[in-house]
Structure formats: structure tokens, C-alpha cells
Image (tube, rainbow, N blue to C red):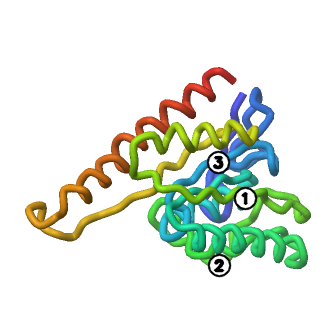
Amino acid sequence: MKREAITPCGEHTAAVSGSGRSVGRRGAVAPGSAWALVTGAGSGIGRCYALRLAALGYRLVIVGNNAAPLEAVAEEIRRTAGASAAGTGRNEIPAAGIQTAGTPVAGRIEAPATPTHLPEVRVMPMDLARVGAAQELHDRTAAEGIEIDVVINNAGIFSFCDILTTPAERIERIILLHDLTVSQLCRLYAADMVRR
């Protein structure tokens, strides 16, 4: 049986039987019970996805082609969770510019995690714009015993040049990242999810 309501912040809540992972809010999980993979997590929307998923209780694998911004996001997640654990007394996490349904979330969002929960974040720097990248990432998470429950394919690259002046190598990398790697990541992790 599933019940659903709307919180004062306008978010949907749900109590879902069966999986044992839902703790009340739609998308929330028991802290540390599920893994989310976010590509392109070093900045922009990918960063926001990572912050939001951490606030919902997910352990994270964050991936991008530059280690420094990924490490900064991982530290931001830990710092935010640590501040929540240390002191608001209301178990809140700053919204940090996260948007829901295209509307900025004002002020703070309530975190489903317990005040002592510090999310686990694994940083995996990797160039995903190449043949074999999806399999390499999948193999690495499997080797570390990580069972991914949510995949956010957010990594992206662009060219602001006219197609005639865009180098052929750049076009190839865009297609590899936006088409091949995304499709293969979905296929690899979905196969694992179905098996479980």
C-alpha cells in the first residue's frame, strides 16, 4: 500500500512497503541504505543532484573529468551534513541553490537523515567521453562492492562553434559522452538492478 501527502515545502512524501528503503519522503531512503551515481557532479546541475541525493540519505559515487571540483563537492556534502549533525537541532540541510520542479527551494530543506549520519561519498575522476568508459566505471564500482540504485547521467560537453569550425575530434567526444557512454551506463547498471 502506498500513501502520499505534500509537505509544507511542496514536496511529495510517500510511505512505500516492499523495498524497505523508503523512510517517508518521496525519493528519501534510510540513511546509507542506497547508492547513487552522479556523473558531471563537479559543478552546476550535477553538483545540485549530488547535494540533494546526499540530503535524501544516499551514499554517493560522484564522477567527472577533473578531481579537484569533485573533491570540493564531496567536502561540501560532508561539511553540510556535519553542520547539520552538530547543530541546527532541527535536522536541516541548507538548500544550497538546489531547485525542485524549476522553482528555487527557499531557505532550508529538511533532511531525512538522522543528525549523526555523515554520507559516504566516493570520488571517481574519469574521462567519460571515450569508448570503454562506461564499462570501466561499472567495473570499478563493482570491484569496490558498490551496488548502484540510482544513475544520474549528467555529464556533458558542448561546442559553441559553428559545426563547420568545430574540430572533428570535439564532435566525436560530444557524441561519445552524450550518446554512447550514457546508453551503456544505463544498460550496465539497469542489468544489475534487475538482477537484484
Density class for disc 1 (Cα within 10 Å; few <14, some 14-19, many ≥20) is many
In depth, the one of 175 and 21 nearer the eye is 175
Q: Which quadrant does the N terminus fall into?
A: top right
**Relative image position of residue 54 (x, y in whole percent):** 70, 59
Q: Quadrant of residue 160?
A: bottom left
In depth, the one of 97 and 39 nearer the eye is 39
The span from disc 3 to disc 2 (Cα, nearest Å) is 25 Å
Which three-letter amino acid code belongs to the residue tagged 3? Answer: Ala
Q: Nearer the viewer, mark 2 or mark 1?
A: 1
Residue at image position (69%, 33%) is 2
Circle 3 SS class: strand
Residue 77 left/right relative to 178? right
Mark 3 and mark 2 residues within 8 Å of each other at the beta carbon: no
Q: Earlier in the sequence, mark 1 or mark 3?
A: 3
Residue 195 left/right relative to 34? left
From the image, tell me which residue sits under label 3.
36
Circle 2 SS class: loop
Q: Nearer the viewer, mark 1 or mark 3?
A: 1
The vertical placement of 177 against 86, above or below, is above
From the image, tell me which residue sits under label 2.
107
Q: Earlier in the sequence, mark 3 or mark 2?
A: 3
Residue at image position (65%, 56%) is 53
Q: Earlier in the sequence, mark 2 or mark 1?
A: 2
In depth, the one of 178 and 129 nearer the eye is 129
Residue at image position (75%, 38%) is 145
Residue at image position (77%, 38%) is 21
Q: Which quadrant does the C terminus fall into?
A: top right
From the image, tell me which residue sits under label 1.
121
Which three-letter amino acid code belongs to the residue tagged 2? Answer: Gly
